[in-house]
Amino acid sequence: MTTADLSLRIQRIEDRQEITDVVIRYAMSIDAADWERYAELFTDPVHIDFSEAGLPAADFARDQFIGFAEAGLGAWDARQHLSPNHIVEFDDQDPDKALCTSYMYAQHYKEGAPGGEFYLMRGSYENHMVRTAEGWKINRLKQRIFWVEGNADAARVMTS
């Protein structure tokens, strides 16, 4: 193995770690309601496909998507998003692109909500990543929902 090969291998390991860190920060930023940090994880514009949850796939200005996320998720009293099982696949044609598939376990709580205080989503994310001057960012995100339980409208009922 040549030094160049070792250098490329090390770069790939570093890239993989940075990509998974971005995906984990996605979940943790939502839970902390740190919308500024959340925004730093995305390109501008960003393609979002949450069609399985009712938001049709579209390109959004980053600030528009962050506003949507803050409005929908900020209404919950507490949130906990777990992001395990990361699989990172690099683009064979472009070393500055990758796909990180991860599981989604998203718990939401709204105290005193009629019909139930708890809502749980289970599924996965397809995080299409690009390397930018600021590091790896999500430029396309597809959410898949496997199953849900609880009261999806708990926060909406309380804030209406």
Image: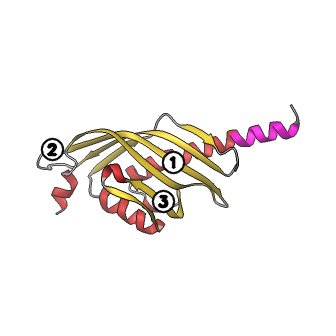
Which mark identifies residue 116?
2
In the displayed structure, would residue 128 be above or below residue 87?
A: below
Question: Between marks 3 and 2, how big is the CA–CA gap?
Answer: 33 Å
| Residue type at numbered disc 3 | His
User: Tag 1, which secondary structure?
Assistant: strand
Cα separation, mark 2 vs mark 1, equals: 31 Å
Mark 1, Cα crowd under 10 Å, few <14 / some 14-19 / many 20+, is many
Quadrant of the image occupied by residue 118: top left
Tell us which disc is closer to us: 3 or 2: 3
In front: 32, or 75? 75
Residue 85 shown left or right of residue 89 in the figure = left
Residue 4: in magenta span:
yes
**How packed is label 2: few (under 14 Cα within 10 Å), some, or many (20 or more)?**
some
Asked if disc 3 and disc 2 are in contact, CB closer than 8 Å, the reply is no
What sort of colour scheme is used for the picture? secondary structure
For label 3, the residue is: 47
8 vs 66: above or below: above
Choose the circle earlier in sequence order: 1 or 3. Answer: 3
Instruction: Kindly identify which residue carries mark 1.
Output: 127
Q: Residue at x 14, y 49 (%)?
A: 112
